[in-house]
Amino acid sequence: MHIDPLEKKWLYVALGMVVLFLGSIFLSLALGIKPPSNVETIDSARLHLSEEFAEDNLGVHIQPDGSIKVIMVAGRYGFFPRHITIPADTPITFRWASIDVLHGVHMPMTNMSTMVVPGYVSEVTTTFPKPGDYPMLCNEYCGLGHDYMWSKVTVVAKQTWEREHASKGGES
Ligand code: CUA
């Protein structure tokens, strides 16, 4: 049987792709690679009744090991609390919930970015190397006030943070 050389070439390309796709499936199964899906659910309408996302609990929490946990909610039109202060060069874990619709949190010039889907908790851990004031913007259209949906994050140098929190600890 005669096969045109060009056709043969494409046959190999097609076969190569099949091998590549199957190979990547097996590889991901073997290495346990999964898409980054967070399946922690929460009732958006009852956030104020939840322990973690109750109003009193929002904001920056210093963990016993020195790492930082930030609990925030996104709602039309802002991220609450509206202004937080966190240290540079420290792992910061953000935990997000929406009180209404889909929002997107984005801090330009950093890698802090996630969608906040109603009904789910979004978690992002990151480190900010550079102190400064950063805007926290919404990047998913969420209504008429979307363009004005932003809050402020102040990143202070690690030494400043440690000095302030050490002196506070000494007072109490
Ligand atoms: Cu919130 Cu756009």
Image (cartoon, rainbow, N blue to C red):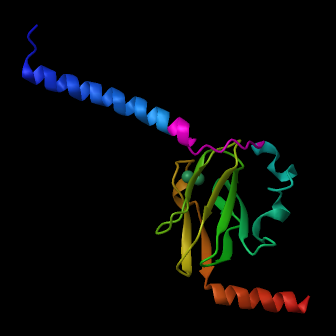
Where is residue 21 drawn, in percent x and y?
Answer: 39, 31
Left or right of 92, for residue 26: left
| Residue 29 colored in magenta in the image | yes
Between 42 and 55, which is closer to the camera in this rendering?
A: 42
Tell me the quarter of the picture where residue 154 sits.
bottom right
Q: Which residues are magenta?
A: 28-43
Question: Secondary structure of the magenta portion, mostly?
Answer: loop
Between 101 and 97, which is closer to the camera in this rendering?
A: 97
For residue 78, above or below residue 39: below
Left or right of 77, for residue 11: left
Where is residue 115 drawn, in percent x and y?
Answer: 58, 50
For residue 92, above or below residue 27: below
Where is residue 48 drawn, in percent x and y?
Answer: 83, 52
Tell me the quarter of the picture where residue 1 sits.
top left
Q: Can you see residue 142?
A: yes
**What residue is shown at x 55% (from left), y 62% (from top)?**
112
**What residue is shown at x 73% (from left), y 91% (from top)?**
163
